[in-house]
Amino acid sequence: MSGWTLHARQAPALRVDLRGIRPAALAPLAAAEVERLPLACGNALVPLAEFFRVKARADEDLVFAADLARFDRLGWQMDGGCIVVEGAAGDYAGGGMKAGEIRIEGSVRDLAACEMAGGRLVVGGSAGDFAASTLPGSMDGMRGGSFIVHGSAGARFGDRMRRGSAIVFGDVGDFAASRLVAGTIAIGGRAGAHPGYGMRRGSLVFAAGAPAAPPTFVPALGAAPVFWQLLARDLEQHGGPFAGLAARGCERHLGDLAADGRGEWIAAR
């Protein structure tokens, strides 16, 4: 068993679906078998060798020495191993992921980490809309694991998220943490309009530049210093805007009362 490095040949004319290309699925295969794996491109199935040169690795990682901006569903329902992308990735990166680790050096498009249930997804650039959110037509968003975005994120970040942690170093778009059911969302930059809309439970943390709490959130009457220290120490391990967070205090609001919610709006100060 071995890992593989896939070197890009050229950017495809149409979008390509990478579902099924996971470390565990490729590890027992020979190079010729990897090259013959079918990828959906438009309405046709095309051998993987049309898009990538295949080279074996000494470790068990799957490395894409390529820009995958036109490749969707990277790590789709991945259940172990490690994927490294030396560039960007398309839609649905890490969607339905259950275990393992994905590291993407560039940015990702929409619906990254949608319905993620476990593992760790790290994006070196920015993420598009509906990251850590639901698949179209579904009711449940991210369900576990850790999702880290070193750049910014688009609208509806963490919509209907149920569990896990989603962390953005930069800014987020409108309706961040909307309809949040549980889990932790931490924002290092600024938020767009209506953050926490319809929030039911969970924690929305602003490391800097927190907007005024919406009128449907009320100040928390009781202090929670132990909870804040545990949460802050966990977040400050990521560095960047979260460095030194445990040494700062916080203000807490509870809501969204318009949705009978009991979520926490936490602003570091």
Image (cartoon, rainbow, N blue to C red):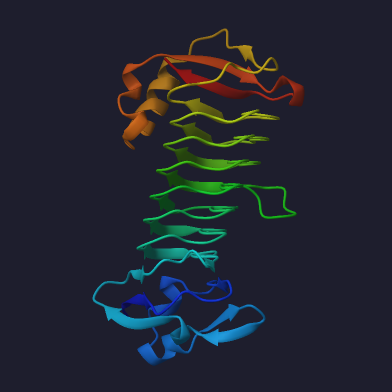
- Residue shown at 56%/42% (left/top)? 163
Q: Is residue 180 above or below residue 52?
A: above
Q: Pinpoint residue 215: horizontal percent, then vertical percent.
A: 69, 14
- Look at 59% across and 79% down and name the residue there: 40
Residue in the image at 35% along x and 63% along y: 86
Q: Residue furthest top?
A: 221
Taking depth in this image into account, of 155 and 132 the one nearest to the observer is 155
* Side (left or right) of 139 relative to 35: right
Q: Position of residue 47 (x, y in %)?
A: 51, 87
Q: How many marks?
A: 0
Q: Quadrant of the N terminus?
A: bottom left
| Residue 233 in which image quadrant | top left
User: Where's the C terminus, which quadrant?
Assistant: top left
Residue 150 place in picture, x, y as percent: 40, 43
In depth, the one of 186 and 126 nearer the eye is: 126
Query: In which quadrant of the rendered view does residue 200 lie?
Result: top right
Q: Residue at x 35, y 83 (%)?
A: 54
Name the residue nearer the viewer: 65 or 34.
65
Asked if 149 appears above or below 246 in the picture, the reply is below
Q: Left of 115 or right of it: where is 5?
A: left
Pinpoint residue 156: horizontal percent, then vertical percent: 63, 41
Q: Is residue 26 left or right of residue 263?
A: left
- Where on the picture, by quarter, is residue 80? bottom left
Q: Is residue 89 above or below residue 216?
A: below
Outermost left residue: 58
